[in-house]
Image (spheres, grey):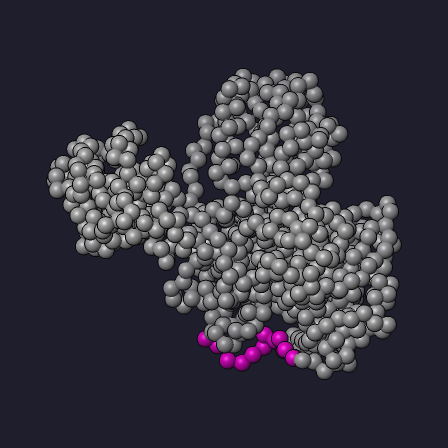
Amino acid sequence: MNLQREYVDIQDVVFDEKTAVQGHVLHLCRQELADLVQDRCFARVEIDVAKPGENCRIMSIGDVVQPMVRLDDEEATFPGVVGAMRQAGNGRTLCLRGVVVSEVVEVLLNLGNFMDFTGPATQFSEFSGMIHVTIDAFPAQDVSKDDYLHALTVASKKAAKYLAQAAKDCQPDQVETFTLERENLEGLPRVAYLCNAFSHAPLTDFTLYGDSMQTSLPTIVHPNEFLDGAMLDRDYGQLINADPSYYWQNQPIILELYRRHGVDLNFVGVVLSNTPHTVTDKQRNAMIATGLIHRVLKADGVMITKEGGGHPQVDVQMDVELLEGKYGIATTLVLCEFLSPNNGSYEQVLFTTEYANAMVSTGCVEPLTVGPVEKVIGSNTIPFYPGFGKPGPIDAKAGFIHRNRSVRGSLGQLGGSYFTTRKF
Amino acid sequence: MAQKLRAVHYINQFFAQLGGEDSASVGIQVRQGPVGPGLGLQKALGDRAEIVATIICGDNYIAEKLDEVVPQVLQEIKSCAPDLFFAGPAFNAGRYGVACGALCAAVKKELGIPAVTAMYQENPGVELYRSDLFILKAGDNARTMAQETQKMADFAFKLRENQVQGFPEEEGFYERGWMKLTRSDKLASQRGVDMLLAKLQHRPFQTEIPLPHRDEVPRPAPVKDLRHTTVAFATDGGLYPAGNPDKMPPANSTTFHAYSMDGQDTLKKEDYTIIHNGFDKTFLLQDPNRIVPLDAMRTLEKEGKVRMYPEFLSTTGLTTNVVNSQKIGKSMAQYCREHNIDAVVLTST
């Protein structure tokens, strides 16, 4: 597997009659994009743009997707979602940088989120520094919430492919090659990545080639498949517990392991596992996943991440105990310290196992006050967050008190966070 | 010049030169002015504060009866009307450290004045009282006495002026169990791989997340005869009567409520709602018996196998901190005791 990602940097997006990329400016035909993503589930679709520094807020953001097209096989871009079922991770893929596609959800979700382009919330999310092409889709009458959300998840991938296609004739600003086949790997520690995804229920899940992992057993996947759009977010039920697709396309652990592959470690591969509901299922997955790491990947050390909320911590505990206790393989966990918002430093993990002696924090939950803005994209409100501020409806335009973790893209569990915590 | 602050200093029998282990049972003594390490402490306090009294107590005397003796010592401290309180430094003396910690915690709580102690990291007083107060880091023996008393004096003034804002490493105290978000110059992914390689190569590394301290909860005795046992349901699944009359929150609960099921054979879906942000509620909303299985319990009751308590206890178990979880659990247990409930079926999601 040899993936060549060609990056085209976008510095501005302007509305125009034709969609094209010219000199780092994306000219966007709104109507053409709206027509492309239209679906029977939508009453109407509004396309807008939000830019860094603008006095603007997006309310209730679903997925955030990096524009991407597979140049050698355009038909198979985002395979299983909007593309043909062909293996990703090989060949040339074009990615736009500096611009993302964001879904604006117009049905009420459990755990609301938002994003600002000015003010204190911008420090929490890398996305506040990018230009967003927003797909604000309003549900058609008598369409179920699930049908609506499914249409939305497809719409953003269609849009992401469409925007990347507009840059096909551009000279890439950077080209990066990803391959595990390198020389001089001997003697370097063999490091694997155990990626615990969260596929809980339809539309509260992560997808692998378009399907949920609810009934999948752990499997070895090639890291390039992540970087080429085969693994995507589809979690609307536990939205803030899920890293959006952008972070699956730019999987932070995989990018870091690739950066050091052949330098100070030997990246031997990825095991992808779900974090199921029941203890027996968790035990089965931990057993199979760790067995693959030991017997097939023959790793000396493993990076472990999880998605979802509290209960997947049980999965990582089982992983650590088996890897360290049974196989003598060193582990490091990456976790967000969000279990208890009162910021007690000893209340952030559910387990105690002597083996979990190396853990990295991606941050903790703190209240966040945001001020008024001139422009709001998205007509939806978000639920008040109990414990922070006064209970009551949230006025998107006027500002409100919520929490740092409700900023889309903040404190990501996949390791794409510059935050940690200091204990005192 | 401002008036001198009044300080009280607590030391044990050893540092008061009353003797070692053989004198560990001596009771409370109050002396005017500084004694033993208090002389050095007074020097460190300088013109700003005066040690008006030194309270001395045997290590065994206080450590064996903390509940009794701490209030007595507190009374003596109070009668000196102090502005500052010092205890120790206790170094690695275990009983002394526990006494210093207990007294500082009591003084902080009851008198609200700066209460400062210092001890060695392995002193059991650290683990017992670190979450209640600032315990300064000290060496394991009295060689460093002059430095420790200087640090204690400086810290007390800082505390009094609300100037303690730094982190443990900078301020020299033991982490109290709280945390604050901070920005790193490296992504978590990079810090993680750095840590893994350090671990693999046996280089030192520091975890960023401490493991929790867990209490051992003893397993209760099994129910001997269900027929003569009153059984109740308690759940953290967030099941409440329709309309959520007690306005229970979808996360971060601090209380529970009990709801009657008297005269019902099954929970009807139109009568109930789920207030909980942590799981897919579809199946429970279809049939609330899936979280509080009243229907099954009524069958057992009709068969004479069990006696059912006609209420269920409910809270929302999501991101509730440990302190509040314990509070809810204790109040549920209290409720069961008051209502003669013998056993509880706990259901969760």
Q: Residue at x 51, y 55 (%)?
A: B181
Q: Is residue A278 visible?
A: yes
Q: Is residue A387 magenta?
A: no
Q: Nearer the viewer, residue A70 or A42?
A: A42
Image height of B56 relative to B211, above or below:
above
Q: Position of residue A124 (x, y in %)?
A: 59, 59
Please tell me whether the stretch drawn in magenta is mainly helix, strand or loop.
loop
Q: Residue at x 63, y 34 (%)?
A: B248
Q: Position of residue A211 (x, y in %)?
A: 73, 57
Image height of A319 relative to B294, above or below:
below
Q: Is residue A296 visible?
A: no
Q: Quadrant of the N terminus of chain A?
A: bottom right
Q: Position of residue B139 (x, y in %)?
A: 25, 54
Q: Quadrant of residue A133?
A: bottom right
Q: Residue at x 68, y 31 (%)?
A: B244
Q: Is residue A147 left or right of residue B20?
A: right
Q: Nearer the viewer, residue B56 or A246?
A: B56
Q: Is residue A175 magenta?
A: yes
Which residue range is magenta in the image?
Answer: A174-187
In this view, the residue farthest toward the front is B1
Q: Is residue A43 left or right of residue B14?
A: right
